[in-house]
Amino acid sequence: EADIYQTPRYLVIGTGKKITLECSQTMGHDKMYWYQQDPGMELHLIHYSYGVNSTEKGDLSSESTVSRIRTEHFPLTLESARPSHTSQYLCASTVSLEQFFGPGTRLTVL
Amino acid sequence: AQSVTQLDSQVPVFEEAPVELRCNYSSSVSVYLFWYVQYPNQGLQLLLKYLSGSTLVKGINGFEAEFNKSQTSFHLRKPSVHISDTAEYFCAVTFSYNTDKLIFGTGTRLQVFP
């Protein structure tokens, strides 16, 4: 079983708040990803990283930012949350073409 | 453009019946194909993958899939489903020239009834 963790699992916040979604993996994987998932829709890649100090924007434009200071940690930050950011956010890491996913954070912005 | 199409958004089936979840992809280059399962309130878990070799791929939980290059399909099958198979199933593809990204289909909701 993959060891990739996301916190919090659920978050309800008001508009304008700054939030950070945490993602950690203990497998030593270099490549990590953030996806946004809406009900009935495919996963959309919003950020990825090849390793420490590497961050890239994904296919779906996002107002969030990421950082990769340590191999095991890939947090996602929203400086000012809006209702349009309401979604599920999934973190993943990969080795040998297989992506391992965390349980997700379900974000609701009121 | 490369894409993945899952033809059925929902598939209802009775327990112990066979099931097939359909997946087609569009690509002009070699691909690697995956099926993931997502149980409620959880992340995605890999069911099986096709990288090369035999076109019939066996995965976990009794699932299998067949890669058909001429029809650009990668349908998922199980001969006898259980209540516990109720979940969302995602087909995904990555490309031999750039394996950094996975492209996902929109998912198929498998609902197994007793």
Image (cartoon, coloured by chain):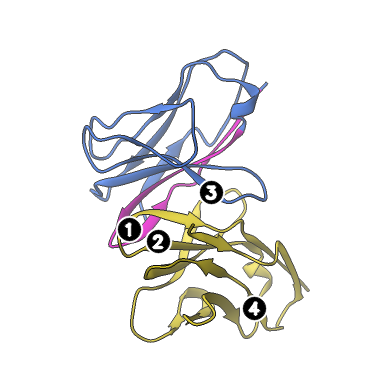
Labels 2 and 1 touching (C-beta < 8 A): yes
Magenta stretch secondary structure, dominant? strand
Where is residue A4? Give x, y as percent.
37, 47
Chain A visual colour: blue
Mark carried by residue B94: 2
In front of the other: B15 or A86: A86
Please tell me whether residue A101 belongs to the stretch shown in magenta. Answer: yes
* Displayed quadrant of residue A14: top right
Amino acid type of the residue tagged 1 in the rendering: Thr
Amino acid type of the residue tagged 3 in the rendering: Leu
Labels 4 and 2 touching (C-beta < 8 A): no
What chain does mark 2 sit on?
A: B
Q: How many angstroms separate mark 1 from mark 3 (CA)?
A: 16 Å
Mark carried by residue A43: 3
Please tell me whether residue B11 belongs to the stretch shown in magenta. Answer: no
Query: If you read the primary sequence from the N terminus, does the residue marked by circle 4 or circle 2 appear first?
Result: 4
The answer to whether B86 appears left or right of A74 in the picture is right
Query: If you read the primary sequence from the N terminus, does the residue marked by circle 2 or circle 1 appear first?
Result: 2
Mark carried by residue B99: 1
Callout 2: SS: strand
**Mark closer to the observer (4, 1):** 1
The answer to whether B12 appears left or right of A96 in the picture is right
Amino acid type of the residue tagged 4 in the rendering: Glu
Residue in the picture at 38% in, 87% down: B54
**Mark closer to the observer (1, 3):** 1
- Chain with colour yellow in the figure: B
Q: Which residues are magenta?
A: A87-109
